């Protein structure tokens, strides 16, 4: 299974266009922020200390979240390709079993997603350094890596179900781009959740990936938030957190980080179970 | 030891087919596109389950001992299925690992297979950049990695130039004779089947003829005598008088013969009128078309 995963990794990184396409949505997102979303969001909130640091941290959390989805999805391009070119036929004559093959695809997707997210995190750190803001602390890094691990697990489980339905590489590439763009809306990354109508807010609350964004925001924005709201009343900080999707409030309840983590784990298990059973069904 | 024996009914692809392949022989499965060749291959490979009937490979039953069978068989698929972005060496290493080979064993296996199909010079090149003939050789090397006793080739020479085709054929012959492998291949080139020990011709999932290439040829071929003459009118009158069935062709006449020797009396009878003659044995292609077009099948 590990050998097969290694082969998939090798193939993914050899295919420069696959790597590029899985990062395309992230690049688009960064471009959007640089050109106008950044200003739009900054204008939307009142001036307070450490504003730039705070908003940059918010953006970084969003970018990493999108990365976790698009790279795990992109890694599955190897699997779609194997289906499209019949390459899987050759594996079916080796002693390796179909569940092990699926396992190999998932492991490679997880490793690619994790690697890319860590890279994004490092790039983000460099961005903080370049704009003269404090770097992420060691604890923040460790915590983020933990969340990233969970993030790629969830993202990979959800995308694994999705890829089963794609039979050609073209359809898959097109879908990846669309999904990469949609994900920004579904997780409240393009536009702060507070400015959206209630039904969209509920959708974002239900969508598991949003919880990854929220967890990352809680970690990355902790320090700048303390500084920004040091002099402000507690209500102001709370409304900012709700508005920016740092904390979700569902039916009057604040969702604690633990609940988010449990929710993500549950979703991961459900989706992995779904994709293995769908895979069995479609093979027949 | 008899290897493959099977009989199973299937709606379309393979219809109640039974045959066996002798160990160490070169066996050809002949049929046009869509005759059911690939289906049979898939079943032997344990990739498809027959609806009914049973298949035994080297004493192991398909559907029950699939894993053992997979170790016994090396396959060369119709399409080139290795990873185009990886080098030949990488491709072979990965496949060898999937068979659970350790590092030393793996390198030895790659050396051994590269030797057989002569691909040492292209080991470092990307599989996707190779020519059709080179790819095919690498495919054969891949099929030999785990030292199978049986080699299955699904249309191994389709789409190759004549030179590569001949090269592949030499290799297949070498593997069968020197390494004692049982070779099972499908083809739609009848001249390739001529090299094999036994041929089965299938059509629409059923066997329509079988035997050694020579048997088939004798059974289905017809010899023809071709005569040219300077005196057309005299020859035609003689033919008509003696009730000889003939066809006119450009520059001469052909007469169907029951066998080659039957030409001699005709030649002696009309010796004075004949300016040249030729006895044409029908090619295997003619045989194939003749078998295939038979009305009773």
Image: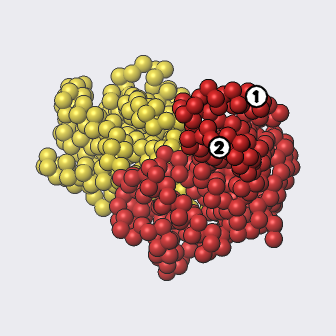
Question: Which quadrant of the structure image shows residue B87?
Answer: bottom left
Which chain did the image draw in red? Answer: B
Residue visible at 77% across and 32% down in the picture: B242
In the drawing, does residue B188 fall left or right of residue B212?
left
Percent x, y of residue A221: 31, 45
Judge by depth and name the residue closer to the eye, B231 or B68: B231
Quarter of the picture containing the N terminus of chain A is: bottom right
| Image label count | 2
Percent x, y of residue A275: 61, 43
Residue visible at 57% across and 64% down in the picture: B172
Quickly name the residue at label 2.
B271
Label 2: chain letter = B
Which chain did the image draw in yellow? Answer: A
In the drawing, does residue B208 fall left or right of residue A17?
right
Judge by depth and name the residue closer to the eye, B51 or B294: B294
Question: Which quadrant of the structure image shows residue B272?
Answer: top right
Judge by depth and name the residue closer to the eye, B46 or A256: B46
The local secondary structure at tag 2 comes to: helix
Q: Separation of disc 1 and disc 2 at Cα?
A: 16 Å
Mark 1 or mark 2: name the one nearer the start of the chain.
1
């Amino acid at each position: 299974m590990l050998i097969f995963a290694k082969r998939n990794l090798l193939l993914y990184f050899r295919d420069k266009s696959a790597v590029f396409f899985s990062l395309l949505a992230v690049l688009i997102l960064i471009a959007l922020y640089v050109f106008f979303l950044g200003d739009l969001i900054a204008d939307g909130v009142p001036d307070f200390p450490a504003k730039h640091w705070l908003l940059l941290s918010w953006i970084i959390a969003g970018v990493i979240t999108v990365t976790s989805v698009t790279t795990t999805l992109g890694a599955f391009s190897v699997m779609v390709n194997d289906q499209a070119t019949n390459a899987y036929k050759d594996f079916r004559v080796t002693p390796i079993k179909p569940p092990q093959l699926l396992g190999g695809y998932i492991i490679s997707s997880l490793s690619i997603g994790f690697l890319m997210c860590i890279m994004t995190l490092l790039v983000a750190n460099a961005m903080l350094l370049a704009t003269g803001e404090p770097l992420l602390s060691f604890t923040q890094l460790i915590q983020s890596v933990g969340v990233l691990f969970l993030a790629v697990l969830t993202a990979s489980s959800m995308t694994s179900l999705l890829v089963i339905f794609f039979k050609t590489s073209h359809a898959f590439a097109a879908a990846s781009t669309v999904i990469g763009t949609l994900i920004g809306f579904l997780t409240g990354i393009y536009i702060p959740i507070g400015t959206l109508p209630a039904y969209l807010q509920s959708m974002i609350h239900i969508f598991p990936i949003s919880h990854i964004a929220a967890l990352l925001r809680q970690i990355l924005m902790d320090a700048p938030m303390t500084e920004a709201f040091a002099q402000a009343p507690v209500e102001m900080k709370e409304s900012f957190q709700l508005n920016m999707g740092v904390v979700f409030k569902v039916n009057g309840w604040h969702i604690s980080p633990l609940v988010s983590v449990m929710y993500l784990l549950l979703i991961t298990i459900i989706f992995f179970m779904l994709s293995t059973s769908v895979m069995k069904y479609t093979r027949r | 030891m008899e290897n493959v024996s099977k009989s199973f009914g299937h709606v379309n692809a393979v219809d109640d087919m039974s045959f066996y392949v002798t160990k160490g022989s070169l066996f050809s499965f002949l049929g046009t596109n869509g005759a059911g060749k690939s289906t049979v291959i898939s079943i032997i490979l344990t990739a498809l389950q027959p609806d009914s009937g049973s298949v035994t490979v080297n004493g192991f039953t398909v559907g029950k001992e699939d894993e053992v069978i997979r170790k016994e068989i090396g396959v060369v698929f119709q399409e080139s299925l290795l990873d185009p972005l990886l080098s030949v060496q990488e491709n072979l290493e990965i496949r060898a690992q999937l068979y659970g080979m350790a590092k030393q064993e793996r390198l030895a296996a790659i050396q051994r297979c590269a030797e057989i199909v002569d691909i040492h010079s292209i080991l470092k090149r990307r599989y996707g950049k190779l020519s059709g003939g080179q790819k095919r050789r690498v495919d054969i090397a891949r099929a030999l990695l785990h030292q199978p006793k049986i080699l299955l080739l699904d249309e191994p020479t389709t789409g190759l130039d004549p030179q590569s085709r001949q090269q592949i054929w030499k290799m297949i012959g070498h593997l069968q004779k020197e390494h004692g492998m049982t070779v099972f291949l499908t083809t739609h080139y009848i001249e390739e089947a001529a090299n094999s020990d036994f041929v089965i011709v299938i059509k629409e999932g059923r066997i329509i003829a079988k035997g050694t290439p020579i048997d088939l040829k004798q059974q289905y071929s017809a010899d023809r005598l071709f005569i040219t003459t300077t005196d057309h009118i005299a020859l035609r009158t003689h033919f008509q008088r003696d009730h000889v069935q003939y066809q006119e062709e450009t520059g001469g006449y052909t007469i169907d013969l029951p066998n080659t020797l039957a030409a001699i009396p005709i030649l002696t009878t009309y010796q004075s009128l004949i300016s040249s003659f030729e006895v044409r044995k029908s090619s295997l292609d003619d045989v194939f078309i003749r078998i295939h077009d038979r009305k009773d099948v």
